[in-house]
Image (cartoon, grey):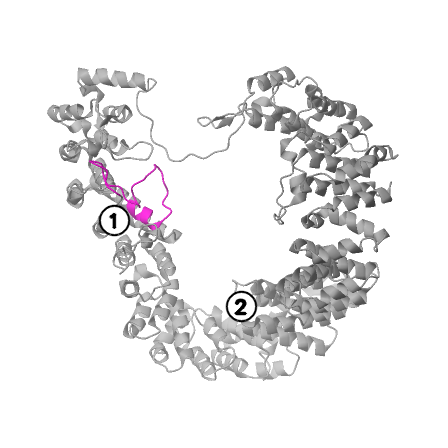
């Protein structure tokens, strides 16, 4: 204690660090004349031995390397050693940074014995250091030419692991095997991990694979590899892009829309690579890929308009600041940037590259040409002017928002460098500009282009014309810079921050001023509705103030303001001055506007015990009849999937009925019920199914006052298409009626089961199960079980799963669930599997039979994620269930538990934690042995997260 080797933890002593005991054990064990295998076989090989094995082997390697190799080989080859201890040994081998010849020899001999964990062993030594050691031992040539497919696989895995650190070595090994049938697979493995920037030799193999189609189907991997390469060797990447895009046999194949299919690739890595390559090696990019872009323009050209540039289906429609979303966009924009850069850095070379574009009719070719001219500026000014003077079609190059902008940019860059005579020619061409195809005057384009010329060199005639154009365009000095599509949220005409400082008088003035629904797309502000949203939020924050303001709001204001104020009162916390709130609601109620009527009940929802009878009567009046055109029934009886309740509460009558039902629930003396009950029949007969779905809430709330009247109204309510029977309030009302008189409900139960609407038959199945378990009416459930209707069985399974531990007939629920667990319908099995959720945090001993049946059934897979949580949270001992669950998991999922792309992998991690906990709590050696057997199987399959779960236990 005084040396801090041990620490006190309550009444217990522990080592200061969990690994210190293992370290002390290892030092003591090294003095013995005993092998690790003999020592481990003599005991139970518990999980705590993992740390001891790790420490012993660590010390052995430092102190006695020869014995280390012997012990490792013995551990891995002994059939008496549990796999979880072999797993520790593999992890130790994986950690070695300088494996020796003798250590590789031990690994090779273990592999020659073909153990069941050979793949795990190969993965353990798939590291750069092990690759170098194996290559030094000339292993890979033999493996790659072996008749044993496993050895070829071992070679590829280890080469992939070494491809980053030793790319030239890997290339040397692969080069003789390019004609091997499996070479594409081998190359794809290496591509995942290789570092190509350090090895032209390996890169050439990548080019070969791309050129010959060997990597077909693995293009994404190629682009990812190029992502790492482009910053260091952009010229190489341009070669690769050319092979992948330009040299492929189907480079110009068109899709059904007439676009080049290969350029529609949306791979993010491909787009990033192309953009970076264009900037990193601009000349190579243009030389290699400009011909492809021209071929695409020709292949996708659109019909020609007289004397206009020819547009194409890929590059003809542009917006500023567009980010490429497809490979074709990235190539075109890459060419833009590359040409502009070259024009700036090497104008003569840029001219060589784009000279061929001058004679082409394509708009996109002209756009690329202009980018080179813009970059070159004064260096190519005279040539640029000659091109622009070839005809008015040369001024049509730009964006969707301004088709002359590209020509303007050229003029801006060359104007100061032009001689007076050329500048005068350009002036003449631009003044009173007429553009094809109709040769009509184009004053905006004329203004765009004329303002690009040097202002101090314009002729008097041009100055006068420019003044006219400015007056025509609201006095603008220069044209607006084109912008792309703009998106935003339409906000209120008065910002929320400013509205916070407004007085009541200012609010009333603002409501009168902003009395229209409008949208200003320049400022992204709206009108009355947008301002009403600010009013709603401020009302919710200060209901007292705005309830008083409501009394000053007349019927002439836009209805959005009153509706939003009512919404805000309902959103707010209950206000101490209830009378003020109710007065505001009454004020709006008296105005009789449908926009207000829908929210009257919402505004009083937090004052249900205080609402006076006059407001109850007003809401009842709205529920009985509204002039709102939206309330007129227009349901299609075949529209069975409609959410009736949601549709109902979004009408005046439906929302009012909901509020009346809430008020009846809080009726302290029956006075509200006295108002409502005489009208229940009329409410139940509403012509709208959606409103009837809300009326059911009123009937249910009235049951405690007049059950007979409710039963009579229910008969009228359900005299309607079947889909009404699947609405939540209707179901709850029906079940409540059946609790008192199930016999009377029998006809509706049978109607549900016989309905043509699947959702209603599912409710029928639920009621049939409830009747069997609670109302001693088992024949309907028997009919469901004997039938072949999936919807009915799903409904019955729902109820049996939820009520297994809350029913008077648990045996019946158990037997029904067992049937449902094995149902041929996947959805029925899924519904029954929900029993795993229903049992959360409950004692599982009483339902052990049911859970065992679930584990052994086809419902196990859908139940598993929730079943694992339920087992984890069970308050009683569930060892047997846990073991049964794990065994079943191994049978059902097996190797899938190692694939992180599957749900089984996530479940495997949870299973590992459950098993480790069960091992710590196991009371007998036999039970611990069972658990260790299962852990070994999971580890051997590589089940995701199990090793981490065991490792966490090691450290505890």
Callout 2 crowding tier (Cα within 10 Å): few <14, some 14–19, many ≥20: many
Q: Is residue 667 above or below residue 776?
A: above
Q: Is residue 190 left or right of residue 616?
A: left
Relative depth, front residue between 747 and 771: 747
Relative depth, front residue between 78 and 351: 351
Callout 1 crowding tier (Cα within 10 Å): few <14, some 14–19, many ≥20: many
The quarter holding residue 368 reads top left
Judge whether residue 329 is colored magenta: yes
Magenta segment boundaries in residue numbering: 303-332
Cα–Cα span, label 2 and label 1 = 45 Å
Residue 389: image x %, image y %? 15, 31
Q: Which mark is residue 898?
A: 2
**Quadrant that contains the C terminus:** bottom right
Residue 507: image x %, image y %? 61, 19
Q: Secondary structure at mark 2?
A: helix
Q: Which of the two marks, 2 or 1, is nearer to us in this view?
A: 1
Q: Is residue 406 left or right of residue 879?
A: left
Give the residue at x 82% y 64%: 809
Q: Earlier in the sequence, mark 2 or mark 1?
A: 1
Q: Is residue 99 left or right of residue 732?
A: left
Give the overall secondary structure of the magenta segment.
loop
Residue with the most extreme left position:
421
Residue 53: image x %, image y %? 58, 74
- Asked if the residue at tag 1 contacts the one at tag 2, i.e. Cβ–Cβ closer than 8 Å, the answer is no
Q: Is residue 866 above or below residue 283?
A: below
Give the residue at x 22% y 52%: 288
User: Residue tagged by mark 1?
Assistant: 293
Judge whether residue 741 is colored magenta: no
Q: Is residue 247 above or below residue 921?
A: above
Q: Is residue 234 above or below residue 88?
A: above
């Amino acid at each position: 204690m005084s040396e801090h080797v041990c620490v006190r933890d309550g009444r217990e002593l522990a080592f200061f660090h969990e690994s210190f005991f293992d370290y002390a054990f290892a030092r003591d064990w090294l003095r013995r004349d005993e092998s690790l295998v003999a020592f481990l076989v003599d005991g139970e090989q518990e999980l705590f031995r993992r740390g001891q094995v790790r420490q012993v082997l660590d010390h052995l390697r430092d102190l006695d390397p020869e014995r280390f190799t012997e012990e490792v080989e013995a551990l891995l080859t002994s059939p008496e050693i549990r796999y979880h201890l072999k797993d520790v040994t593999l992890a130790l081998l994986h950690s070695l940074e300088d494996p020796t010849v003798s250590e590789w020899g031990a690994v090779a001999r273990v592999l020659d014995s073909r153990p069941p964990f050979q793949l795990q062993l190969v993965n353990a030594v798939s590291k750069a250091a092990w690759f170098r050691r194996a290559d030094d031992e000339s292993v890979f040539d033999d493996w790659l030419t072996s008749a044993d497919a496993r050895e070829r696989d071992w070679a590829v895995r280890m080469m992939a692991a070494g491809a980053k650190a030793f790319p030239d070595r890997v290339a040397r090994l692969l080069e003789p095997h390019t004609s091997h049938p499996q070479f594409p697979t081998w190359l794809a493995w290496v591509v995942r991990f290789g570092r190509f920037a350090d090895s032209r030799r390996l890169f050439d193999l990548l080019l070969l694979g791309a050129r010959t189609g060997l990597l077909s189907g693995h293009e994404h991997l190629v682009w990812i590899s190029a992502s790492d390469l482009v910053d260091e060797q952009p010229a190489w990447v341009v070669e690769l892009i050319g092979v992948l895009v330009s040299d492929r046999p189907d480079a110009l194949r068109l899709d059904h829309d007439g676009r080049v299919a290969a350029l529609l690739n949306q791979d993010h890595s491909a787009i990033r690579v192309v953009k970076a390559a264009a900037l990193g090696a601009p000349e190579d990019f243009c030389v290699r890929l400009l011909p492809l872009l021209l071929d695409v323009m020709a292949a996708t050209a659109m019909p020609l308009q007289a004397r206009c540039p020819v547009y194409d289906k890929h590059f003809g429609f542009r917006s500023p600041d567009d980010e490429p979303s497809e490979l074709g966009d990235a190539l075109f924009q890459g060419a833009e940037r590359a040409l502009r850069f070259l024009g700036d850095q090497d104008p003569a070379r840029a001219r060589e590259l784009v000279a061929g574009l001058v004679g082409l009719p394509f708009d996109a070719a002209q756009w690329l040409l202009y980018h080179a001219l813009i970059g070159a500026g004064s260096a190519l000014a005279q040539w640029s002017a000659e091109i622009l003077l070839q005809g008015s079609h040369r001024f049509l190059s730009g964006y969707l928002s301004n088709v002359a902008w590209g020509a303007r940019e050229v003029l801006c860059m060359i104007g100061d460098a032009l001689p007076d005579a050329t500048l005068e020619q350009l002036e003449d061409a631009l003044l009173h500009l007429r553009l094809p195809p109709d040769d009509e005057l184009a004053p905006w384009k004329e203004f765009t282009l004329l303002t690009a010329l040097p202002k101090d060199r314009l002729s008097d005639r041009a100055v006068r014309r420019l003044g006219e154009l400015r007056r025509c365009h609201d006095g603008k000095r220069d044209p607006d810079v084109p912008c792309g599509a703009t998106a935003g949220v339409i906000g209120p005409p008065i910002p929320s921050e400013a509205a916070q400082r407004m007085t009541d008088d200012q609010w009333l003035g603002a409501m009168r001023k902003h009395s229209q629904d409008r949208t200003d797309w320049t400022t992204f502000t709206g009108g009355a509705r947008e301002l009403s949203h600010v009013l709603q939020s401020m009302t919710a924050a200060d209901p007292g103030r705005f309830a008083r303001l409501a009394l000053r709001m007349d019927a002439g204001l836009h209805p959005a303001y009153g509706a939003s104020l009512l919404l805000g009162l309902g959103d707010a916390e209950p206000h101490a001055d209830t009378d003020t709130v109710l007065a505001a609601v009454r004020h709006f109620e008296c105005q009789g506007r449908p926009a207000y009527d829908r929210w009257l009940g919402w505004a009083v929802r937090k004052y249900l015990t205080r609402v006076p009878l006059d407001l109850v009567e007003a809401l009842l009046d709205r529920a009985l009849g509204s002039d709102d055109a939206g309330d007129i029934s227009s349901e299609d009886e075949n529209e069975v999937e409609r959410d009736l309740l949601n549709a109902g509460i979004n009408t005046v009558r439906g929302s009012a009925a909901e509020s009346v039902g809430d008020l009846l629930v809080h009726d302290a003396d029956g006075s509200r019920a006295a108002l409502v009950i005489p009208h229940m029949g009329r409410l139940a007969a509403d012509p709208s199914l959606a409103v009837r779905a809300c009326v059911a809430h009123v009937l249910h709330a009235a049951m405690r006052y007049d059950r007979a009247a409710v039963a009579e109204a229910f008969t009228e309510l359900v005299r309607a298409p079947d889909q009404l029977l699947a609405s939540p309030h209707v179901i709850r009302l029906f079940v409540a009626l059946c609790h008192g008189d199930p016999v009377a409900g029998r006809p509706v139960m049978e109607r549900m089961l016989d309905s043509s609407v699947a959702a209603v038959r599912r409710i029928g199945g639920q009621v049939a199960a409830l009747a069997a378990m609670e109302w001693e009416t088992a024949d309907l459930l028997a009919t469901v079980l004997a039938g072949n209707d999936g919807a009915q069985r799903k409904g019955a399974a729902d109820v049996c799963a939820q009520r297994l531990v809350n029913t008077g007939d648990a045996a019946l629920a158990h037997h029904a669930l067992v049937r449902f667990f094995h149902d041929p319908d996947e959805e029925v099995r899924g519904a029954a599997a929900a029993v795993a959720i229903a049992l959360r945090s409950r004692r599982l001993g009483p339902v052990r039979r049911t859970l065992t049946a679930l584990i052994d059934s086809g419902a196990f897979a859908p139940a598993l994620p929730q079943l694992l949580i339920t087992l984890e949270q069970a308050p009683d001992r569930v060892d047997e269930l846990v073991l049964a669950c794990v065994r079943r998991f191994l049978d059902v999922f097996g190797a899938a538990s190692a694939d992180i792309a599957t749900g089984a992998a996530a479940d495997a991690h949870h299973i590992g934690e459950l098993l480790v906990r069960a091992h710590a709590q196991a009371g007998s050696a036999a039970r611990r042995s069972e658990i260790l057997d299962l852990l070994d199987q999971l580890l051997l399959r590589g089940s995701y997260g199990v090793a981490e779960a065991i490792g966490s236990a090691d450290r505890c």
